[in-house]
Image (cartoon, rainbow, N blue to C red):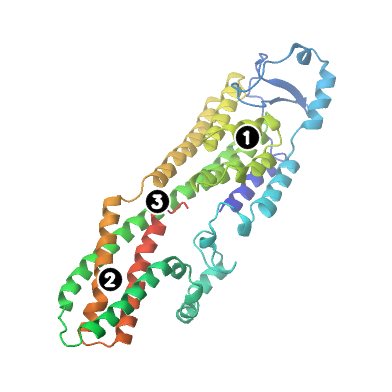
Amino acid sequence: MMILSSILLVGSFVGVDSFQLPLTRRLVSPQRNNNVVSATNNGEQSTIISAPSSVISPTHTSDTSLPTTRRNKNNESNADTLLKFSTDVQHVLHNLRAMESDPCIPKHLMGHHSSSLSYSKTWTLDDWEFHNSRKRYFRYLKNIPHSRLMRRIMPQQVALLIWTILSVYLEDQFLSTYKPKIPLSALGTISTFVGFLLTLRSNQALSRLMEARTLWSKVILNTREMSSLIASFIYPVDKQLALMLGRHVALFGWLLKSQLRFTKKDDVVELVRTMLPNKRDADYLLSQRQKTVAVITRIRQVLAHLGKAHKLTTAEEIALDHTAHALSEVITSTGRIRASPIPTLYTSHTSRLLVFYLFCLPPALHLSGLDGIMTTVLTMVVGFAMFGLDEISHLFEQPLE
C-alpha cells in the first residue's frame, strides 16, 4: 500500500508543469521573514524554508547582503526538481523499502516463502485466484509443517502432548484396578463457555483489524489528497516549497508504520536522509520523538508562511489544513489501537479456562474407554483448534504490527 501511495504521490507532481493554474488572482507580499530565504527560480518567486523556526539560526547579515545574481546561482545548484524527487522515491522503493527487506514488517507475517499469501501486502488478481482455488484444502493440509500459526502455537502443543502422554501413562500404571469416571458432559459444558469466550475475543480482535485497515486506507487517501492539493495550489507559485512538502508527505506513511511497530530509530535514518536531501530538515525530523507529528507541523508552518505572503486563497488554505487535520487524526486513532488492547481481565480469564479444560480433557477421554493413541490424537486436534483460535485473536488484537 505504501508503494502505491508513493507512486501516486510523485505522479501528482509530474503533470503539473503542463497545467499551470492562473496566478493573476494571487497577491505576492513584498515583506520577507527573517527565517526565509527568497530566490528566483525559472522566472517565478520561490521560497525555501530549511527548518522550523525553533531550529533555524538567525540569518547572517553577510548572507543577505550578497548580490542577487550570486544567490540565484547557489540556489539553482541546490534546487530540488521533480526528477530528483522521483529518483529518490524509486531508490527507496527498490532498495531501502523493498517488500522482502522492509524492517517494519515482522518476519512471521511474511510467510515461509516470499510468494506466501499474507494480509500484510496488497493482493493482485493472481493472489485472489490462488486463494479461492478449489485445491486450497489440500494445499493447506500439505503446508501444515510450514504454517505460521503452527509455529506460533508449537510450544503450547508440545506441553499439551507431554501432559497427555504422562496422564495416560499414570492412569495405566496406577489406576488399572480402579478407574474413576470423569463425566464428559461436564467437560462439554466447560467447552461451551471456552468456545464462546474464544469466539467473542476473536470478534473483538477482528473489529480492531477492520478499524486499523480503515484507518490505513485513510492514510493513503489523505496523503494522496494532500499531494494533489500541493501540486495544484503550491507548486504553481513556489516549486521548491511544494517539492519539500511532497517529500515530507511521501515520508508520512513509512514514519507512521515505523512508529506503530516500535522499530528502532536507526531503521528510518537512511530513509529520512534519502527523502530529505536538506540536512537541516532531516536532522530536525530525526530529532523528534513523534516524527509523524513533526511532518504535520512542517506542513502547517509552510501554509502559515504562504498565507501571510498572500500566495494562497482562504479556500486553498482551508482545504490544505483540513487534509493536514485528517492526517493528524489518523495518528491519534492508530496510536489508540496500539496503546489500548482488549481488556486484560477478559484475556486472562479466557486463558485460565482454556488451560483448565485442556488439562482435564486427556484423563477424561482415556478413562471413558479410549486407548492411549486415540486419546492423544483427539487431545492434540482439540488443542490445535483452541490454541489456534486463541493465537489468531492475539494476532488480530494488534493489527498494526
User: Which image quarter: residue 368?
Assistant: bottom left
Which of the two discs, 3 and 2, labels the residue nearer the N terminus?
3
Label 1 packing within 10 angstroms: few (<14), some (14-19), many (20+):
many
Closer to the camera, 390 or 304?
Answer: 390
Observer-side mark, 1 or 2, equals 2
Gap in angstroms between the C-alphas marked 3 and 2:
33 Å
In the displayed structure image, the side of residue 250 where residue 387 appears, left or right? left
Q: Residue at x 84, y 21 (%)?
A: 70
The residue at which mark 1 appears reads as 245
From this view, report whether residue 149 is shown above or below residue 19: below
The residue at which mark 3 appears reads as 211
Kind of element beneath mark 3 = helix
- Please give the label number shown on residue 358: 2
Residue 32: x percent and y percent?
67, 15
Gap in angstroms between the C-alphas marked 1 and 3:
28 Å
Which of the two discs, 1 and 3, labels the residue nearer the N terminus?
3
Kind of element beneath mark 2 = helix
Kind of element beneath mark 1 = helix
Q: Amino acid at mark 3?
A: Glu
In the displayed structure image, the side of residue 295 where residue 193 appears, left or right? left
Observer-side mark, 3 or 2, equals 2
Q: Amino acid at mark 1?
A: Leu
User: Which image quarter: residue 304?
Assistant: top right
Check whether the beta carbons of the residues at disc 1 and disc 2 lie within 8 A of each other. Answer: no
Q: Is residue 367 visible?
A: yes
Gap in angstroms between the C-alphas marked 1 and 2:
57 Å
Q: Residue at x 57, y 31 (%)?
A: 299
